[in-house]
Structures are given as structure tokens and as C-alpha cells.
Image: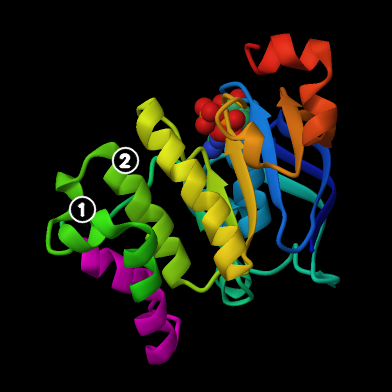
Amino acid sequence: MLEATGLMVFYENMLALNNISLRCGNRSIVGVFGANSAGKSTLMYTLSGIILDIQRKEEMAGGERISVFGEILWQGDSIGHLKASRRARMGIILCPERRRIFPESSVLENLRIGGFLASRKQRKQTLEYVFHIFPKLKEIARRPGGFLSGGEQQMLAIGRALMAQPRILLLDEPLLGLSPLVQVLLVKSITEIRQQRGITILVTEQYARPVMPIVDYAYILENGASVMEGDREELLNNPDVRSAYFGI
Ligand code: ATP
């Protein structure tokens, strides 16, 4: 289980995360929904540890001061002080917003890069699995990442994250800018990944509607604070939530 308590992140004096607490049980799918700038990416950076890299870079460059507070537990161990690379080795893997594919490397090379910490056997098995859930990637294995459609890039980003052997996958706005048809395909593959690989999934989205059917539990962020939380049925049955967040 991933458990965060009282997360606060300041960019200089700007409060980007305001006392966020969340839990993500093993093998669950948990959603975090919020508008632009609500703090979704900051939350993902904080859980994955990338915020500490950004913080250090800013410090070295004499840039803005980033302050991070709160506690993060992974399977009961405190990890908030650990670097992103350490957390990645423990199975906490971020699939970042806007995919961040290596544009000049082929699909296969992008996937191999994702698996560089894995054993040979894991790499081979996971590559087969990635091609099984995203057969399209096998067809275009030699194509440079920069020549892929948005949907293909997102499949590749998820595939690359899977190659890193996640126990929890942090998916930051995976549906961003994609057609409804591709969204449906990706949402289906997210449930398959949980079912078939037992991977826990924390997913952020601006619009809750496409992802809501597959989440067990969700949080709603506004201006860096969690304003509502509940399991799927609770949120779907709340009339305020329905009209304000799901457009139903
Ligand atoms: P989006 O959907 O646009 O990605 P988000 O919900 O992921 O939004 P964040 O990117 O976490 O939101 O941003 C939260 C707030 O923190 C925003 O007001 C943003 O402008 C601010 N912010 C993010 N990164 C920085 C930074 N490096 N320096 C200063 N402010 C930042």
C-alpha cells in the first residue's frame, strides 16, 4: 500500500499541494481528478520522488525554492526522503504527463530503456506482455518514437513504464489529448494491467468521466487541496459531484 499523509509542496511561496493525504491499497485503481493547475503533476512528482530532483536542480541553479513536507509510506516503510531512482527500484514508477518519449529512439529502444534496471528474463517476459496488450507497438517496433501518433506514444509510455517492473504505476493524465476511441482502449488496458499483472494504479485526469468506471476510489483536487474523496459508487451517486466533475 502507498500511503501519503499531510503532503505540502511550496514553489517559493506558492502552495501547490495543501495537506494532501491519500491511500492506494495493493492492486487497487485510485483516481485523482482536478482541473488544470490543481496540483496533479506535483502530487505525482512528490510520490515518485522526482520533486526532490527538481528541488536539487533549482537549488544548484540558484532558482526557486521548493519545499516539501509530509510523510509517504510504501508497504509500511517511510520513503519520502528517498531519491526517485531508489523509489523506482522499489517498484514506484511514474509514467509522466505528455509521455516524454525519446523521439529519435525506436519503439523497441524506448522500451529497452525502460527495462534497463530489470533482469534479462524480466525484460524478455515484459516485452512479450507489452506487445500482447499493445499489439500495435509490435507492428511499429522499429519506428522512431517521434513519428508515433498521440495514442501510440501513450501506449509506448505505459509499455516503457511496465518494462521498469512497477508494483505501483503512477499514470499522470494518460488520456490527455487523445480521441474517445483511443481513450476507451487505454482505459481497458489499464484494467487489464491491474488484473493480469497485479499492479496497483494511481491515475490522474482532468476529466473524471472516462476513468471513473474503473476506479475503486478517487480524490478530487482543487487548488492543491483534496476537496472530496470516496469510492466509485459514493462519488457517482453524489449529485454535486456528478454535475460538477463528471458532466452527467
Ligand atoms: P495540469 O493539468 O496543467 O498539468 P496539474 O494539476 O498537474 O495541472 P501542477 O502542474 O501540479 O498541476 O501545478 C500546480 C500549481 O503549481 C500550478 O499553479 C502551477 O503553475 C504551479 N507550478 C507547477 N510547477 C511549478 C514550478 N516548477 N514552479 C512554480 N510553480 C509551479
Secondary structure under tag 2 reads helix
Look at the image and say whether residue 134 sits in the magenta stretch: no
Look at the image and say whether residue 112 sits in the magenta stretch: yes
Amino acid type of the residue that numbered disc 2 sits on in the rendered structure: Gly
Residue count near mark 2 (Cα–Cα under 10 Å), binned few <14, some 14–19, many ≥20? many
In the image, taking residue 149 as reference, residue 210 lies left or right, namely right
Which quadrant of the figure contains the C terminus? Answer: top right
Provide the residue designation for mark 1. 145
> Which residue is rendered at x = 46% and y = 66% of the image?
162
Magenta residues span: 107-127
Quarter location, residue 72: bottom right
Foreground: 43 or 93?
Answer: 93
Q: Which mark is residue 151?
A: 2
In the image, taking residue 100 as reference, residue 136 lies left or right, namely left
Secondary structure under tag 1 reads helix
The reply to whether discs 2 and 1 touch (Cβ–Cβ < 8 Å) is: no
